[in-house]
Image (cartoon, rainbow, N blue to C red):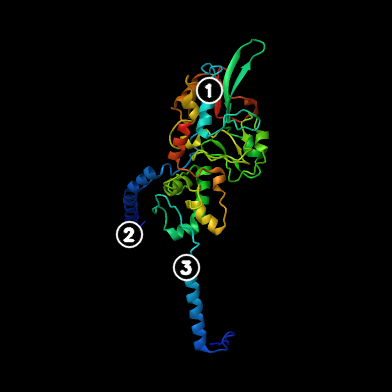
Amino acid sequence: MLFYPCFICGGNEMMKILLLSILLLASTGAWAADSSAPKLDIGKGGQCVEDTQWMRKNHMHLLKHQRDEALRKGIRDEKISLKNCIECHASTKDDSVIARDDSFCVGCHRYEAVKPDCFECHSGTRKSAWLQQRNAK
Amino acid sequence: MSEIDTHRRNFLKTSAGAAAVAIAPGFMLFDIAHGKAEGASSKVRWGMLIDTAQCKTGCDECVTACNKENGLSGGTAATDSQWIRKIEIKDVSSGRELSLPMMCQHCENPPCVDVCPTNASMKRADGIVLVDKHRCIGCRYCMMACPYKARSFVHEPLHNQNPDVPRGKGTVESCTLCVHRIDEGKQPACVESCPNKAILFGDLNDTNSEIAMKVRTVASVQIRADLHLNPGVRYQGI
């Protein structure tokens, strides 16, 4: 086994462990105390596809796969569809996932500084709300 | 074949059958819960038969219904999207006048698909010609290629689109045959709205469908049939 001298504390093993644990504590503390993390209006919420952490990481892959299946092949999986996401996650106040700063899509995307293109074309509103608005005209 | 072999064979056959029975109810539930999981079928060819004798001059119910369904402004300026138009034609020698709706003819060999550099212009397995706006770069080659002038370009940013009909600036669009309604088992909006039932919609490949029977028995033409595009929209009485 090879031992490399620690450049910070000059090879003192105890000091090394202490320093590492302090660093570790400091970093986890920073995550937990992040007050700027987005607080979202999740609408009705609930889980129908995968758990929250999985969805945070992978929802874009599902949507991208599904959009090609639905448009080009006509395979309309109702569960994994943008429209169905909006159906549950649109705010109960304004029926939208993009209307406000804490709306379901906007909240995280603004925090992560990633601009979603979806809503250049797609509606961010619940279908029922859209129908109501159209029929009121 | 030895006796053991035939036993194995029979065992595999029966267990496969049992598995299929056990799975089948699950599949059925899945189909009910999630709509059409199997997608568009190439056994189907959606088409329309338009009876010009029933299409009244001055009536534009189909156009209004299309605009409402797909969220079009209804404007007719050069930069406004028009998915369906009413056309008045007159035979100069006889003076006979006709009125008919004109939209994407959903060709079997669509020139818009041929020219598209990004494969955005596409034909679905069931014959519906669509624009995949995820891929469309707005070059408008397809608009040039279409002999029916059926396509429009979106020039301005749009808001409040129908959740079932995404539309956006910088892409080309045209009649989708109300694909979102067809996939739900409904008829296109223009067909449903026509007060004279001048538009007949259905599966041209299904020999027992109303449209297939009518196409077999009455004289109908495809517009610009000389181009051999084989449009899915046919006109009667031109």
Residue at disc 1, secondary structure: strand
Q: Residues within 10 Å of mark 3 (few under 14, many from 20)?
A: few
Q: Nearer the viewer, mark 1 or mark 3?
A: 3
Front-lying residue, B141 or B230: B141
On the image, numbered disc 2 is attached to which residue? B4
Same chain for the residues at labels 3 and 2, yes or no? no
Depth check: B87 or A114 in front?
A114
Chain holding disc 2? B
Residue at 37% of width from left, 46% of height from top?
B30
Image quadrant in which you'd find residue B96: top right
User: What is the quadrant of residue B111 in the picture?
Assistant: top right
- Badge number at residue A33: 3
Q: Which residue is mark 1?
A: B50
* Mark 2 to mark 1 CA distance (whole Å): 65 Å
| Comparing labels 3 and 2, the label whose residue is closer to the camera | 3
Above or below — where is A58 with respect to B211?
Answer: below
